[in-house]
Amino acid sequence: MLVLFIIGSLSISAQDTPNDAGGSITLGFSYTAPFVSGEVMRKEDGGEFEKIATVSPSDTHWIDNSAKDGVKYYYQLILTTEEGVVTSEPVSAVSSPQWFHRGRTVMLIMVILICGLILFFIRQARGGKELYIRRIAGLEAVDDAVGRATELGRPVMFIAGIMDIDDLQTIAGLTILRRVAKKTAEYEAQVLMPTSRSLVMTAAQETVKEAYYDAGRPDIFNPDNVFYLTDDQFGFAAGCDGLMVREKPGAIFLMGSFYAESLILAETGHSVGAIQIAGTAMPSQLPFFVTACDYTLIGEEFFAASAYLSKDPLQLGSLKGQDWGKAIFLALILIGAVLSTFGITVVKDLLMVQ
């Protein structure tokens, strides 16, 4: 509700601040003649006016962030001019929270569009339509890497980073572990997995166990092959390096969050002649993996591995819908950039989040 009074050349308005979570009232005012200083007065029903703020001649509005929702406040502006004091009539307003930020309507439309695309592609995938996903060399090489290790009579080594189970990259790594473990079970090979977190060890043991059951070979599952080393970053790296040198794995998978130990692990794996496939979303470590490993899953390729390997309709549809959403956003950004070059800011203004 907007209330406006004009007293001579002084006008003042009070309204609930739009698109906020409540607790604020916006005052607007203007005075045609210069003034020296101004005071904002406020009171509640049955109370007396009290000074709550001062305004300068350059101000055109002021926000009262101390207002309580549901309480009716009265405001008055007192200006000191060269001719004297000018006082406005009281105006009132009530603060309340808004359910929806109207400045983010375009964002809501985009969210609805992307959700619609995801549901559409999930339905298509469940209906039997084959959804195209570009070939990811690192994931295509998983079966070949396990097969090579089996032919050499060497174990497969899997390292899911150094972070705990609450890290998304660790979870993504365990998803790939399931596929690797299933292949090692089918080929009757060994998978060795040192961990730096006890919870990761427990989750990995269950993941490998289920993979062996899926492959129909629960009899060759050995829970001792998934073991805990240490929480210490470089202690863990040293332990993994020692394991690589002793066991000489034929294939090494480095999937998860890595930091300064990434190059230490990758170089040691390269020195023992293992085929190495790495995956991480850590930009600072990607150059080391690209240099020392045979294949590297970069960023979103790593997170897309679950859908890529499982071919689950729900995951495939979600991945496809998100890709289309990103393509739409990218197209809008490019169009907005081109139009802005010529001074047309329509698209840019639409994409601005207030």
Image: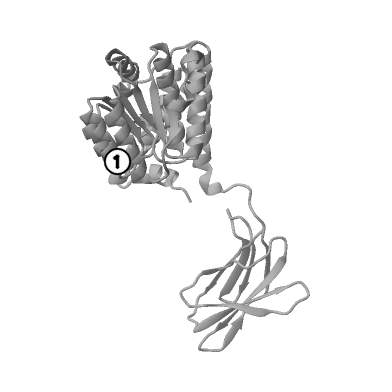
Task: Name the residue that disc number 1 marks.
Answer: 285
For the N terminus, the quadrant is bottom right
Task: Name the image quarter holding residue 29.
Answer: bottom right
| Lateral position of residue 295 relative to residue 351, left or right | left
Number of marks drawn? 1
Task: Name the image quarter holding residue 131.
Answer: top left
The answer to whether any part of residue 298 appears in the image is no
Q: Nearer the viewer, residue 32 or 237?
A: 237
Most distant residue in the bottom direction? 83
Coordinates of residue 176 in the picture (x, y in percent): 42, 25
Query: Is 92 located above or below residue 22 in the figure?
Result: below
Q: Nearer the viewer, residue 327 or 125?
A: 125
Query: Is 258 located above or below residue 213 in the figure?
Result: below
Residue at 37% x, 28% y: name it. 158
Query: Is 58 located above or below residue 207 in the figure?
Result: below
Query: Is 87 located above or below residue 67 in the figure?
Result: below
Q: Secondary structure at mark 1?
A: loop
Going by the numbered disc 1, the residue's amino acid type is: Gln
Residue at 51% x, 70% y: name it. 60
Most distant residue in the right direction? 46
Image color mode: one colour
Q: Tag 1: Cα neighbours inside 10 Å, few (<14), some, or many (≥20)?
A: some
Coordinates of residue 254 in the picture (x, y in percent): 34, 31
Q: Nearer the viewer, residue 4 or 329?
A: 329
The answer to whether any part of residue 148 appears in the image is yes
Coordinates of residue 248 in the picture (x, y in percent): 28, 25
Coordinates of residue 33 in the picture (x, y in percent): 49, 79
